[in-house]
Each structure stands twice: as C-alpha cells, then as structure tokens.
Amino acid sequence: MSDSVDLVYDEVITCKMCGKPFDTRRHIMTTKVRLGIKGDPEWLYLCPDCKRYYTAKKMLENAVGAKGAKSYV
C-alpha cells in the first residue's frame, strides 16, 4: 500500500470589479470548454454579486438603446 499524496495547485481568481476571490482558474477554464465560450468575456471573471449588477446594467443599456434609437424609415 502506498502512502503517496498528489498535490494539485490552482490559481484563485479575484473579481475584476470588486476584487473578492470567487473561483479557480481551472473551474473557469472547464466552464469555458463546457459552454463552448471563445475568448475571455469580462463577465466570466466577475463574482456572482458583480455578475448580477453587470447583467442588469447591460439589459438596461440594451432596453434604453432600443427605445432611444431614432427611426428614419
């Protein structure tokens, strides 16, 4: 019987908005592969709290942009 131990090191990722540690690099890379995400979208590096704020802000910008757009037809 072997008493060997395998140590695995991973980098903790901090939120790009608030700086709070929230995930590991390995988990983010696995998420990207499973979801088929290309590149590095900024929302992927946000903690859950900041991701909610970011999503709400983008939705509001899109809604206001659609209503505020002038029609020349």
Image: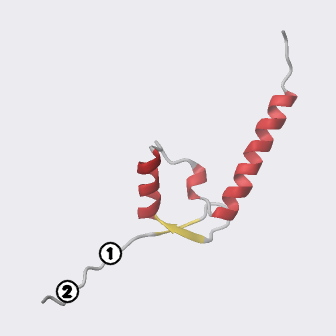
**Residue closest to the far left:** 1
Residue 66 appears in which quarter of the rendering?
Answer: top right
Would you place residue 33 above or below residue 63 in this image?
A: below
Would you place residue 23 above or below residue 64 in this image?
A: below
Number of marks in the rendered image: 2
Q: Amino acid at mark 1?
A: Val
Q: Is residue 7 left or right of residue 48?
A: left
Q: Amino acid at mark 2?
A: Ser
Secondary structure under tag 1 reads loop
Q: Is residue 70 left or right of residue 30?
A: right
Front of the two marks 2 and 1 = 2
Find residue 29 and report its horizontal and vertical position in percent.
42, 56
Of residues 21 and 52, the one nearer the viewer is 52
Find residue 35 and report its horizontal and vertical position in percent.
47, 47
Badge number at residue 8:
1
Q: CA distance from mark 2 to mark 1?
A: 13 Å
Residue 15 appears in which quarter of the rendering?
Answer: bottom right
**Residue closest to the far top:** 73
Q: Callout 2: 10 Å neighbours few (<14), some, many (20+)?
A: few
The residue under the point 81% across, 36% down is 63
Q: Is residue 2 left or right of residue 37?
A: left
Find residue 48 and report its horizontal and vertical position in percent.
64, 63
Find residue 53 and report its horizontal and vertical position in percent.
74, 56
Secondary structure under tag 2 reads loop
Q: Callout 1: 10 Å neighbours few (<14), some, many (20+)?
A: few
Residue that numbered label 2 is attached to = 4
Badge number at residue 38:
none
The residue under the point 50% across, 48% down is 40
Q: If the image is split into quadrants, where does the C terminus sit?
A: top right
The residue under the point 29% across, 79% down is 7
